[in-house]
Amino acid sequence: MKIRLERKEKPFVLEATNETGNSILLDASPEIGGRNAGTRPMELLIMGLAGCTSIDVLMILGKQKVDLKDYQVEIDASREKVGQASLFKEIHIKFKMFGEVTEEQAKNAINLSLEKYCSVAKTLEKTATITYELTIQND
């Protein structure tokens, strides 16, 4: 995996580009001189968790022939100061599934992702407690 990063504007507007040419803007908070012109690095990490676990969950449910009409994830995360860094301490994921999926199928897919497959979750669990809740709407 290779990422290229270059500054687009002073002081902290950065563009990160992956090997396939997809890019994202990053910036710092106004408290340290940023302008909120891009996603903050720690937000990207949580977005990565949402994406990683979602890909797992959707793949697992897809293999079970579960056809979701819609799917959403929200994450609430809190950090605590450890030395000069602020590490994630608690991460709560809210999974929302719409369609013909049973609670057992959904929870099984989520648990497999968080406990076995999602590399981002496995990385974050070293400093944070990750919990989740599930809402299913079968309309």
Image (cartoon, helix red, strand yellow):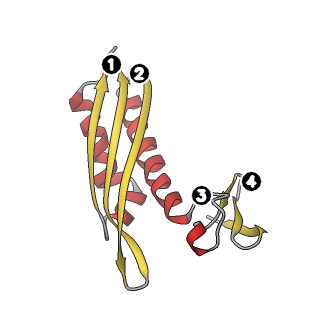
**Could you give the CA–CA distance between mark 1 and mark 2, rounded to whole angstroms?**
7 Å
Q: Would residue 107 be found to the left or right of residue 79 on screen?
A: left
Q: Residue 32 at x, y = what percent?
A: 59, 75
Residue drawn at (29%, 26%), measured in percent from left and top?
136
Q: Residue 137 at x, y = what percent?
A: 31, 22
Q: Residue 9: name its quadrant.
A: bottom right
Q: Residue 139 at x, y = what percent?
A: 34, 14
- Quadrant in the picture for the N terminus: bottom right
Residue drawn at (37%, 36%), measured in percent from left and top?
60
Foreground: 91 or 51?
91
* Label 1 vs 2, first from the N-terminus: 2
Other-residue count near label 4 (Cα within 10 Å), few / some / many at <14 / 14–19 / ≥20: few
Q: Which residue is mark 2?
A: 67
SS class of the residue under badge 1? loop
Query: Which amino acid, mark 4?
Result: Gly
Q: Are marks 1 and 2 in contact (CB under 8 Å)?
A: yes
* Label 3 vs 2, first from the N-terminus: 3
SS class of the residue under badge 2? loop
Residue 100 - label: 1
